[in-house]
Amino acid sequence: MKALRRPLIAGNWKLNKTVKEAVELVTLLKRLLADCQDVDVVVCPPFTALGEVSELLIESEIRLGAQDLYWEEKGAFTGEVSGSLLKDAGASFVIVGHSERRQFFHETHETVHKKTKAALKSGLVPIVCVGETLKEREADKTFEVLEAQIKGALTGLGREEVEGLAVAYEPVWAIGTGKVATPAQAEEAHVFIRTQILREFGEDVAAALRLLYGGSVKPDNTAELMREPDIDGALVGGASLEAQSFSAIVKNAAGAALK
Ligand code: 13P
C-alpha cells in the first residue's frame, strides 16, 4: 500500500527568513536537490517571501506552500490572505491548523474546517495538522484528541476532496523540543488516523491519503520514521531552515521509501 503513495517532505519555515535569506536558502536547495526525483518537496516561507521564492522555483521540481490562509476570498478582512491570493503568488500547498495557530491564535475545529475547504476550493493542497499535547498524551487522550481534530477538519468534505489533501500528525510535545516520537508511537497514531479516514471516506481515500509526521524531524531520524508503513513524509520545522539538513532529510526519505 505504501508504495502507491509518493513521499512528501514539507519545510515549515514558521516566522523565519528575510526575503534575501529565503532566496539564499532556496538557491542552495535547488542545487542540492537537483537530481532527487522520488519525493515531492515543498517549502513554506513566510508570506513576505512567497513572490521571490516562487520566481526562483519556476524551473524547479520544488513546490511552494504557505503557512496559513483565510477562508474568505476577498473583502474587508485586514491582515488576511486568501487561497486565491496564495495561488496567485505561486503557492500550490498550504499548511492548515498548525498547533501553533491553534495554541496562539485560537484556531478551532470550525476555523480549521473552513480553511481546509477554502484551500481546496482555491486549488491548493491543504496540509491539515493534528496532534496531542503532552498533557493529553499523559492523560491517555491521544486518540480522543486526534479523532476530534480529524472530524472537525474533514467531516462534510467530499471523498475526492479528502483524497487530494495531506494530514500531518504533529504531537505538540515533539515540536521544537528535540524529543521526536518513536517510529512506533508515530506509526500508531498514523494507523489510527488512517482508520478514521477509512471509516468516514472509504478504503480508496484512506489508501491514497498522505500522512506526514512532524516534530523534531532531523536527517538522522528520517529514515527510521519513513520506513513505517503509514508514514508517507514529514513536516519539518527547525531542520528546514538550513539547506544541508533539509536536503539530507529529503534524500534520507527517498532512500527509505525505495526499500
Ligand atoms: P520542528 O521540526 O522544529 O520540531 O517543528 C515541527 C513543526 O512544527 C513543523 O510544522
Image: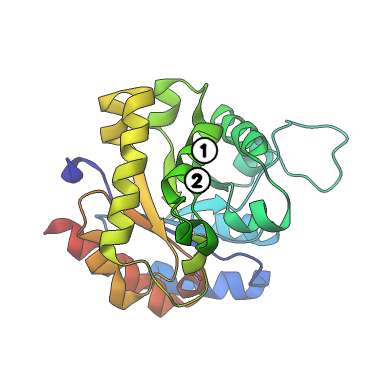
- Using the rendered view, name the quadrant where residue 14 is placed: bottom right
Mark 2 closeness class: few <14, some 14–19, many ≥20 residues within 10 Å: some
Quadrant placement of the C terminus: bottom left
Apparent side of residue 225 relative to residue 234 in the rendered image (left or right): left
Residue visible at 54% across and 51% down in the picture? 65
* Rendered view: 225 above or below 20: above
Q: Position of residue 199 (x, y in %)?
A: 34, 26
Residue situated in front as seen by the camera: 139 or 122: 139
Residue visible at 66% across and 41% down in the picture? 108
Residue visible at 28% across and 54% down in the picture? 187
Residue 229 shows up from this direction:
yes
SS of the residue under disc 2? helix
Residue labelled with disc 1: 148
Residue visible at 66% across and 43% down in the picture? 69
- Using the rendered view, name the quadrant where residue 16 is placed: bottom right
- Using the rendered view, name the quadrant where residue 75 is placed: top right
Cα separation, mark 2 vs mark 1, equals 5 Å
Q: Amino acid at mark 1?
A: Ala
Q: Amino acid at mark 2?
A: Val
Whether the residues at callouts 2 and 1 have beta carbons within 8 Å, the answer is: yes
Residue situated in front as seen by the camera: 88 or 185: 185
Query: Can you name the residue that lies furthest to the front here?
Result: 139
Q: Is mark 2 within 8 Å of ligand 1?
A: no
- Display coloring: rainbow
Mark 1 closeness class: few <14, some 14–19, many ≥20 residues within 10 Å: few
Residue situated in front as seen by the camera: 108 or 158: 108
Q: Position of residue 180 (x, y in %)?
A: 39, 71
SS of the residue under disc 1? helix
Residue labelled with disc 2: 145
Quadrant placement of the N terminus: top left
Apparent side of residue 26 relative to residue 184 in the rendered image (left or right): right
* Rendered view: 93 above or below 51: above
